[in-house]
Image: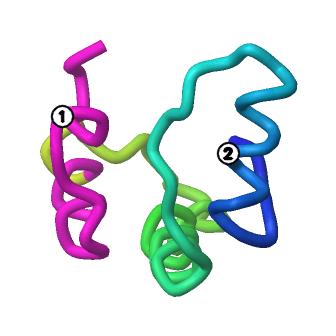
Amino acid sequence: MQLFWSEDDVDEWVARSGHSKGAVFGVEQLWPLAQRWYDDRRELEWRRKSARERQAILDDVGLVGPFWQVGSR
């Protein structure tokens, strides 16, 4: 994951680096994603979220489409 100020900055980085542009999303989705993804990490009986649970989190915060399909890559 790379953090940028704006999508223009992403485009400039892509042009300079030669990397392809992946999925881009803003902090309005990042913060809810982080809260949901890591909400239970400090519990003694923590377990990795299932693929279904991970997919539900991505869907719930609006990260949808082929890039965001759990297990598709």
The residue closer to the viewer here, 48 or 15, is: 15
Q: Which contiguous range is marked in magenta?
A: 54-73
In the image: residue 32, left or right of residue 31: left
Residue 4 among magenta residues: no
Q: How is the image coloured?
A: rainbow
Placement of the C terminus among the 4 image quadrants: top left
Question: Which percent across, then down, holds residue 15?
Answer: 75, 29
Residue that numbered label 2 is attached to: 11
Q: Percent from the top left, x then y, of residue 49?
A: 34, 46
Tell me the number on the disc at residue 66.
1
Marks 2 and 1, how far apart at CA? 21 Å
Give the crowd class for mark 2: few <14, some 14-19, many >=20 residues within 10 Å. Answer: some
Quarter of the image with the N terminus is top right
Find residue 30 and report its horizontal and vertical position in percent. Answer: 56, 72
Q: Left or right: 14 with respect to 66?
A: right
In the figure, 60 relative to 16: above or below? Answer: below
Secondary element at tag 2: helix
The three-letter amino acid code for the residue at tag 1 is: Pro
Q: Are marks 2 and 1 in contact (CB under 8 Å)?
A: no
Vertical relation: 50 (above or below) 35: above
